[in-house]
Amino acid sequence: MASFLYRLGRFSFRRRALVTAVWAAVLVALGAGALTLSGQLSNSVTIPGTESQKAIDQLADRFPEAAAGGATARVVISTPGDITDAGGQAAIAGLVKGLKNAPKVAGVTDPLQMQAISPDKHVALAQVSYRVPGFELTDADRDGLMAAADSAEAAGYTVEFGGDAVQAMPATNATEGLGVAVAAVVLIITFGSLLAAGIPLLTALIGVGIGMAGITTASGFLELNTNTPVLALMIGLAVGIDYALFIVSRYRHELTIGRDPEEAAGRATGTAGSAVVFAGLTVIIALAGLTVVGIPFLGEMGIAAAITVAIAVVIALTLLPAVLGFAGGKLAGGKIRLRRKESATTHGERWARFVARRRIPVLIAAIAGLAIVAIPAASMQLGLPNDSTAAPDTTQRKAYDTVARSFGEGANGPLVIVVDLSGSTDRQAALQQAAAGIGGLSERPIVTPPKTNRDGDLALLTVIPKSGPSSTATEDLVSDIRGLNAGLGTTTGASLAVTGQTAANIDVSEKLADAMLPYLALIVGLAFLLLMLVFRSIVVPLKATLGFLGSVVATFGAVVAVFQWGWLTDLLGVKTTGPIMSMLPILLIGVLFGLAMDYQVFLVTRMREEYVHGAEPQQAMVTGFRHGSRVVVAAALIMISVFAGFVLAESSLIQSIGFALAFGVLVDAFVIRMTIVPALMSLLGRGAWWLPKWLDRVLPDVDVEGEKLAKQLDAPDERELVDASK
């Protein structure tokens, strides 16, 4: 592989105008597609095969007039006075009329007719159902919904809106660009050159632009989740900068030892480029592996991000050498001096020698620190976002709080019970038994009168719990209601299923939790094989994966402490706390594993390079750490900066993903890879590179360190010297 990448790097360097033109054409073509073919993104979270989704499909087929699969909105009108007096009734009538005339509305419940009036008569609650799912609603549709409140608000009443119909698509925030700005500063400090710092940023932004344009174009043909481009942007930008940083750093090293620019570009691509390929493969494996857990929206997010990573790898191997061709030898040295020139023994070497001397205390301290930070993870509660997790100043949160105070928290998350009466001989008795059984459960929920379809073989019951949609009591209630199905079928021949947004969120959370361990086993197993191929060792991949598990558990603990317990929320700008997003743990496992293996490859390949060239294990660790640590530190700081920028986003999901990835990279890079890894390498010595002889013969030699490439390139030079001496 190193020889192929060496030739590719030199070709791109020589044909830089052609390579640059090809990538520019790709960017323009996909950009045009994004402008003309883009479609609507979806914020729906569904998993085929769950009970709630099966019930929705059943309703769509046999009870379409119920619009059960459509978006819903809760409209809360309140006043300090009596909402049922003449003025209040007129305001409610005007509000209901306006709601019925809003775009795509299927039906509106009148609070006065349904007696949806709070006991203190200060608040009335209207329910709006739509013909289409929430992701099909446009901003104009939401504006039409909000406009229905104009007359009531003009009369002095307060109107707030909740429900999935009001949830707009999360938008990127200009403050997220702070991560890119910090990355630029880190690159300038690392290289001491504006030109050298600008090249990784330029190629990374081009790669992200191509990836984002491709995703936007694909949205015109596929139903994509609204968080899909955000994750691709986050990951693509971080790895794009890191991969370019690694190759540019090696290119500058080759220039400083006297290589001409073309040869330096070829060797940098052949050596550092090989590490980039395998680092990228670990990220791609982890992200693409999200497709096998049976969760469509996670799968599409993983595939989109994996494609963006693949683009970053290809750009680092082709466009980057072409750009280096335009820069030539100008990158040989930095002109910006931000610090004193280091002595021969660098900070990295001093740290490596310190860790080697104090390896046992260092290991104990690092592992104990991880264990302490991980403690909150034991109380992690999973859930999906609802109006209770919206920012306090939003209309969704105000509507949720008003409904909770006036009607009880359960009114914010009603359950929909679908009773299939087609197999029952006494349908009325079956409905009565279902309603009585639900009403007699320990929580004593409110059960509304049933609605039946035209054929009378399918009925709907609305159940209002006493507890909120994210509480464990509501989860228990859903389980108890579903437990009634067997007895109902035995006595009446009917069957029931629980659906609605609250039940669907519970089903999704359970599915995600069940998929976590199989997914973890899959990506860890595949990556272990890949790392064994790269390092030709069993011990190195084993400690790499075990270290990753430590960083993941510590990250879970930090996420729970901030987003569930509320620690440091003011400092980090987190506006709401609550259950951790159900998709976050499995998404974090996939993304963080790939990124963690990046640092493992970047750092340990240089150690192995020294070892295979004859250095003693201790010296190989120190020398490899000295060469790789500066790049790894810069790469980690860049990733942390990029991810931390997303903590300032509007969406709580994006906030939590950004924080989790930033903290995870911080722990994995500086505690696992920069501390525990060199300590273990020093402790194990030659044992770290142990590989059974039979396995050594079976495994193909991919030459990531470029040892064979170096022999091929240096041998002709030696022959020329011999010939010249004759």
Image (cartoon, rainbow, N blue to C red):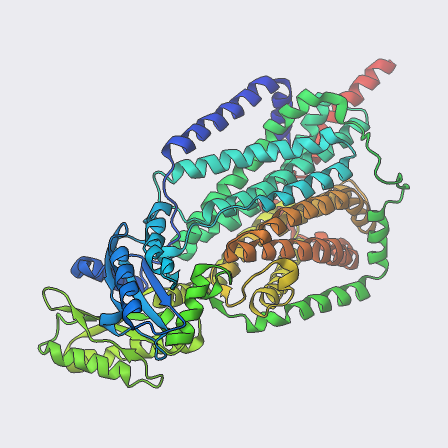
Asked whether 543 or 131 is in front, the reply is: 131
Note whether 113 is above or below 134 in the view shown.
below
Note whether 74 is above or below 608 in the view shown.
below
Residue 407 pos. (x, y %): 37, 75
Asked whether 361 or 465 is in front, the reply is: 465
Quadrant showing the C terminus: top right
Q: In terms of image quadrants, where is residue 33?
A: top left
Q: Residue at x 28, y 52 (%)?
A: 102
Q: Residue furthest right?
A: 343
Asked whether 213 or 615 is in front, the reply is: 213
Q: Is residue 702 visible?
A: no
513 with respect to 73 (left or right): right
Residue 430 pos. (x, y %): 16, 79
Note whether 672 is above or below 367 in the view shown.
above
Q: In terms of image quadrants, where is residue 478?
A: bottom left
Residue 291 pos. (x, y %): 43, 51
Q: Residue at x 34, y 57 (%)?
A: 149
Quadrant showing the N terminus: top right
Number of marks present in the image shown: 0
Q: Is residue 594 visible?
A: yes
Q: In terms of image quadrants, where is residue 323?
A: top right
Residue 519 pos. (x, y %): 48, 58
